[in-house]
Image (spheres, rainbow, N blue to C red):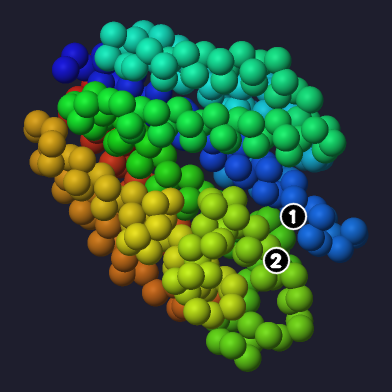
Amino acid sequence: MLSRVAERVYWQARYLERAENTARMLNVFSTLLLDLPPRTKLGWHSLVEITGAYQVFDAKYKHATERNVMRFLLVDNNGHSVLDMLAQTRENARTTREIMPTEAFEQINNLYYFAKEHAASGVARGPRHERLEEIISSCQQISGLMAGTMSRGEAYCFIRLGRSLERADMTTRIVDVGSGNLLPALSRTDSSEDAAADADEPYASTLWMNILRSLSAYQMYRQHVKHRVNAVDVVAYLLQDEDFPRATTHALITLTHVLKKLPNNTRVAKQVEKTLRFVQKGRIDLLLDNGLLKYVDDLQVEIASIHQKIADTWFLPNK
């Protein structure tokens, strides 16, 4: 496969997954407003931090209000909004149409134009949920269509690489911000049953439930984790569970399987194995009170190294 084609299908998958994840995040944390006391202040700037675009945001907006953050992450022309990510998805799909199912490109095209026309209305609370749900649903339909119609050749391998790496990265970002900044006074709780029931932090479980919901993980968490919702178990589940598709460990395991089908995979495979060992060895119960943020930051560096080795191995160098 040509390097330029491999790179474009890889990024098409990453941008589509990123658009869906950002829409999920905005949708769930808007819902969180309804679950918390009226005077509780959400750290809206933390949602910008998840995307890593806080410097771009701070240069344009003086205040991280709900409306400013929603506009920035939904429709602004900044390289980080849902609309811009769908535009990048469409452009990468357009330039690789010869290897992509026609129906998939048509759906990507339709989704982009839907977002272009309607996403701005999602800045306001009233229509926000409906607009975001439509974007999320369409992203899932596109991913499902490609999964059900593409041959399992190299092109689909690079789509899986992009999607899985993006999931691993976004999950760590959501855990990072949820653990430290979103609701600083409420974001931690002990994993023991006695402490979890402590009334000192009555809304901590609400925060962690919504973090689970942002990744569609709440139902699977309740099925597989028998404790009530608490910080230790939620973080461990999202980072270390091997079976949940959006857990970081599961995404890394998927990468190991996909890499076996690609040539010259040694350097990338070694980095994935290194990252997998790192995430699995973490003692979340010990790290939560002191060291979790550094652990997650270091994990993000390892994930970024996977991307760099993918680029060095299979993509043309940037001029």
Q: Quadrant of residue 206?
A: bottom right
Q: Quadrant of residue 8?
A: top left
The residue lying furthest to the bottom in this view is 194
Q: Residue at x 33, y 33 (%)?
A: 147
* Residue 77, position as x, y percentages in the image: 64, 18
Q: Mark 1 = which residue?
A: 32
Reading the chain from its start, which is encountered first: label 1 or label 2?
Answer: 1
Residue 310 falls left or right of residue 77: left
* Residue type beneath disc 2: Thr
Camera-nearest residue between 224 and 215: 224
The residue lying furthest to the right in this view is 39
Camera-nearest residue between 145 and 139: 145
Up/down of 36 relative to 257, above or below? below
Camera-nearest residue between 81 and 267: 81
Q: Bin the neighbour count of mark 1 within 10 Å (Cα to Cα): few under 14, some 14-19, many 20 and up.
A: some
* Residue 162, position as x, y percentages in the image: 34, 33
Q: Is residue 313 visible?
A: yes
Label 2 element class: helix
Q: Residue at x 52, y 73 (%)?
A: 232
* Residue type beneath disc 1: Leu
* Residue 255, position as x, y percentages in the image: 25, 44
Label 1 element class: helix
Kindly indicate whether the residue at mark 2 contacts the one at mark 1 (C-beta within 8 angstroms): yes
Up/down of 202 relative to 303, above or below? below
- What is the C-alpha distance between the residues marked 1 and 2? 8 Å
Q: Residue at x 46, y 60 (%)?
A: 238
Residue 206 marker: 2
The C terminus - image quarter: top left
Q: Bin the neighbour count of mark 2 within 10 Å (Cα to Cα): few under 14, some 14-19, many 20 and up.
A: some
* Residue 283, position as x, y percentages in the image: 39, 74
